[in-house]
Image (cartoon, rainbow, N blue to C red):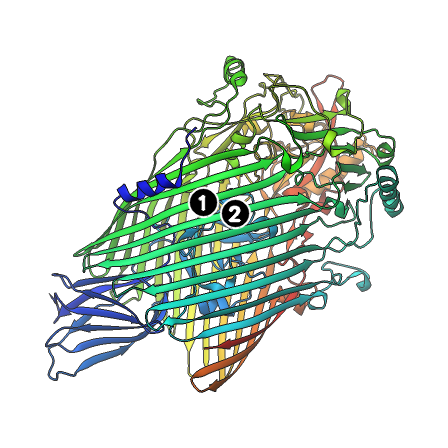
Amino acid sequence: MKKFTILSLIALFFVSAASFAQGVTTSGISGRVLEGAESSLPGATVVATHLPTGSVYGAVTDYDGFYRLTNLKPGGPYNVKITYVGFDDYVLNGFSLTLGETRRISATLTESQNALDEVVITATTNGVFDADKTGSETTISQAKVDALPNISRSISDFARLTPEAQVRGDNELSIGGQNNRYNALYVDGAVNNDAFGLSDSGTNGGQTGVNPISIDAIESFQVNVAPYDVTIGGFSGGAISAVTKSGSNTFEGSAYTLFRNQNLAGKTPGDFEDESEREKLPRFTAYTNGIRLGGPIIKDKLFFFVNYEGQKDETPQPFNGDYAGDSGISGLSAFRNYLISEYGYDPGTFNENTRTLDSDKILFKLDWNINEDHKLSFRNNYVKADFFGIGRSSSRVINFTGGAQNFESITNTASLELNSVFGNNFSNRFVFGYTRVRDDRGINGDPFPNITVRDGDGRINAGSEAFSTANLLNQDIFTLTNNFQIFKGRHTITLGTHNEYSSVKNLFLGRNFGAYSYNSLEDFFNDDADRYRRGYSLLGGSGDNSVGAAEFDLFQLGFYAQDEYQLTENFRLTGGLRVDLPIWDDGRGNEDFNTRGVELLEAAGKDLQGARVGQGPKVTAHISPRLGFNWDVKGDKTTQIRGGLGVFTSRIPLVWPGGAYNNNGVTGDEVDFRARNGFVPDFNPDVNSQFTRDLEFTGDIDLLAEDLKLPQVFKKSFAVDQKLGYGFTLSGEISHSDVISGVNYENLNLEGPQFQTTGAGSRDNYGFEKIDDTYGNVFLLSNTDEGESYNASVTLGNNFYSSKLDIRSSATYSYGRSTTVFDATSSRSISNWAFNESVNGSNQLGTSISDFSQGHRTLANVVMDYKWSDNVKTTIGLFYEGAEGTPYSYVVGFSEGLIADVDEGFVALPYIPATFEEANLVENRDGVSAEDQYAALEAFISQDDYLQDRRGQFAERNRNRARWSHVIDLKFAQEFSVNVKETKHTFQFSADIFNFTNLLNKDWGRRYFTSGFDTATLLNFEGFAADGTTPQYTFNDGVGRGLNRIDDAGFNSSRWQMQLGLRYIFN
C-alpha cells in the first residue's frame, strides 16, 4: 500500500523550491514612483504603516521606479510615505485594504524647495477597481459582516452576496452552477473544507449544523469564482477565503448574547380558510453567547486575540395532529404500546420532535512582528458540537424520537503563517496547517431494528435510525503552503508547490441493526414483513465495534509558476501554469473478483477502464493553464475591463472514491430480501444476532477507473466596470464553463437491456439481470467531459457618505444555467447512480439540467449608518433576494419494474401522451375509469406550458422550476457609547429578522419547494399488459399537491424569525 507519513511531507517541503498558496490571507500595495512626467525615480523609499499594530512594511523602488509591498495585513487604516533625498515627501493617509486587494499607489515626486515639504493626500476607497481583479470576486468587509442580517451566523449568509452563488436547505452553497462539494474554504490560508464531503454546507462539523468558526472571529471574507491567479485553487465552483481578527496596540473586546424563542417567530405560513389554523412554533429557546478579547503583549511586536462562543439551539418541528394514515392517531398509540409490551422497547414520542444543537467554539491567535521583514502568526480553532436530529412528523410521515441521531463532532484546526521579505526583490509566504476531525454519528435510546410501516397514505418510522447504527469518521489533514515571489521590473514572478496529506478512517454500515418494512400496521402485528435490509461486516462485530473500517490516505502535490506582467501603467496581464498530482492509496484486494469476476464482466462487453478491487487510480497530472487581464482604460479608475480563461481543478469529496475502500466484496455484505422473491427473515429484536450469510465474497463493489481524474472545468469570463458619477458604479459580467472531467457512474454488473417496451413511449427494460450473481452492484467511478454552465450578471452599486449618514448599496440581476450527467448529490455510489430521473436507466444517462442550475436571481443589499451624535449611531442592513425556485422533474411512480435497472421507484421520466390511446391508462384502485383519468391528465397537461410542448415525447429531467420567491432579511442595530479616559465603551442592541417580508404580511415572503426530492409523480406504473411488454399506468390525481409547497423548515423558510442581540464593546 502507498502509505505516507508526515516525515515525507516535511522532506518534500525542504527539497522544494517553494510551495503554493491556496487561500487568500493578505493584501498588498504596488506602484511606480516618477520624477517629472515620464522619468522613473530609482532608490525612492516606500514605507507603509499599519496604524493599529504599528506593523511597518518597506521597499525601495527599482531601476524603473517600480516597488511592491506584499503580504500586508488586510484592513487598516494604513499610512504610506514615499521619500527621496531632495524631493518633497508623498504621504497617503487613512486607507484600508480589502482582503486580496493590491492597491496601486503611484506618485510623481517634485524637487523640494523646503526640506520639510510634503504632499499629504487623504485616501479614497477603490471599490471594484483593483488591478489584481480579473474574474468574478466578492469581498465582504468587517463592516458589512457586522451590518448585514446573519441569524444563522454562517459563512453562507455572506457568500450569498455573490451573484453566481445560491444557498439552499441547510446552508447548501452552490457557486457557478457547480456541485456544492466543489467549493474550497480557507481560514487564514488553511483548508477548512469538509474534505470527506458528507455535509451539505461543505464545512467540517456541518452534518450537525454547526458553523466551522464564529463569525465574531472573522475580519473579512472573499469569494472567488474565476480568479485567473494560479495561487488560488482546489475548487471548480468557488473559493471562499476568510481571515480571522488579530490583536492590536489597543486592548479591545466584546461580550454578546443572542436569543430566539417561539415568540420571535411567525405563525404557520400558507393559505388557511380559518385563521385559527395558523399556529405558532412550539416552545423553544436558542442562545448564543460569546466573548472576544484582543490586545498587545508587547507593543508594536506581539499581539493576542481570543474568541469564545457557546451555542444552545432548539429547533421545533411542529406536528399539527393531522395524520392521513389508515391507522389514525389511535393506531400509532397501539403500535407504541405493542413495542413496549412485546419487546420492552420504547420508541419514544412523535409529536414533540425538537432538534437540538449544543456547541462550543474557541479561537486563539498570536501575531508577532519579528522585525520589519518577518511577521509570524499562529491560530488554533476548536469546535465541538452535539446534535440531536430527528425528522418532523407530518400528516403523511410519523417519526418516533427513538429514530433520532445523536451526533458528536469535534474539529480542531491549527495554522502557522510566516510572511517574509528579502531585500527589494523577493518575498515569501509560508503556511503550515493541520485539521483534526472526529465525527461519531450514533443512535438515540436503546438499540433496536429499524421499522418502516406503510400505512395507506401515511408512513410510520420507528427503531434506531438506519444510518446511525455503525457510522464514524476520523480525518487528519496536513498542508504545507509556501508562496515565493520575485520582483523584476514590470514582472512579478511566482513559483510554488503545494503538498497536502489526508488520512481517513471511515466506518459505515447502513441498517446494521436490521431494517424491516411492512405494508400495513396489521402486517407488522402479524410479523409479515415485505422487506428486510441490512449491512454488516464479514469480519465480525456490530455497531461502532464492527471490524473492517475503511482506512486510506491521499497525498496531493501541486506545482505552479506565474508571471504578473504590468504591460503598461494601466494594463496588467497574468499568466500561469499549474499541475496537480493526486497520489491514491491502495485498499484491500479481492482475488475472486479481480480474476473470475473481471473475466465475466469483460466477456459481457464491460469496460472496466483498468479498475481492480484494492487498486487506487494511477498518478495523473492535472494541468491548469490560466491567463487573465485587467485594463484601466483611461488610467483614472473610471472604466475597467477585465477577464480571462483557464482551467480549475477541484478536490473530489473523499467519500466518493472512499466507497472503493469500504465496498470491496470481502469486508462487508448488504442483504436486501423482498417478500415477492419468496423470503424475508422473521422479526428479531436483538441487534447483535441479525441475519447474516456465510459467504467469503459478497456484497456491492465500488471500483475506481485507473485514470480517474479530479473534477476539472475550463472557465472563461469577460467583465466591464464603469463609474457613472454620484457614487454609482455599473458592472456587467459573463462567464462560461466547460466540463473537462466530471464524475461518471456505471453499474458494470447490470446486464444490457433484455427487451424494449411496446406501445407509445418505448424504453429499455433490464429485467434486473446481473452478470455475476456472486456480487450485488458493481459501480465504476470514472470521468465524463459532458456538461457546461454559464452565468451573466449586471450590478449597480452606490456609496454615499456625509457627516451624519453613510449608505452603501448594490443591486444585481443574474442568470445561470448548468447541465450535467451525474449531479452526485449523495455520499454513496448507489444513490449517485440510481437516483437520476431518466428514460432508459442510469447506465444510459445523457446531459440534462443540473440540480444546481441557478436560473434567474435578483439581489440587493443596503447598509445605512446614521450618526445622531458622536455617541449614538443607528445601523440598518437589508438583504433582498428574488429567485426562481429549484428545478424539478415529472416522474412515474412505483416504476421499479418499468426500467428494472434498480429496485427503487420514482425515477422514470414519463411519456407525455398526445392521445388517449398513447396514455395506456387502466382503471385505478379507486375504480376510476381510464377515460375519466385521461380527462384529468389532459387538464393537468394543458395548464403546464412545458408538458404541452412535450406531447408525444418523454419529459426531460429538471425542465420545470418551482415558483419565484421574494424575501427581505433585515438587521437593525442601535449603539450608545461613552468615552472613559482613552477607552470607548459601546452598548449595542440588535435585531436580525430573517424573512422580514413575511413579518410585514403573512402572504409575503413565501419560499416554495417540490416534494419527493424535487420530483412530481405524474403517472403510476401498474405493471405490464398480458403481452408482458406494454406498460400500463394510472394518473396520479395528487400530482398538483406536491408542486410549489410552502417551505416551513429552518431559517431559509416562509416563516419570519427574529434574533435579538445585546452586545458590549470596548476599544
Q: Is residue 480 positioned above or below 841 on the image?
A: below
If you read the primary sequence from the N terminus, does the residue marked by circle 1 or circle 2 appear first?
2
Asked if one can make out residue 782 in the rendered structure from this viewpoint, the answer is yes
Question: The residue under label 1 is which amino acid type?
Answer: Ile
Give the number of the disc on residue 437.
Answer: 2
Residue 355 placement (x, y as % from top left): 69, 54
How packed is label 2: few (under 14 Cα within 10 Å), some, or many (20 or more)?
Answer: many
| The disc label shown at residue 829, or none | none
The residue carrying pointer 1 sits among few (fewer than 14), some (14 to 19) or many (20 or more) residues within 10 Å by Cα, namely many
Q: Position of residue 271 (x, y in %)?
A: 75, 58
- Spatial CA distance of label 1 from label 2 is 9 Å
Residue drawn at point x = 75 percent, y = 56 percent: 318
In which image quadrant can residue 957 be found? top right
The amino acid type found where label 2 is placed reads: Val
Answer above or below: position of 588 versus 556.
Answer: above
Which residue corresponds to mark 1?
A: 477
Q: Are marks 1 and 2 in contact (CB under 8 Å)?
A: yes
In the image, residue 190 lies at what x, y percent?
41, 52
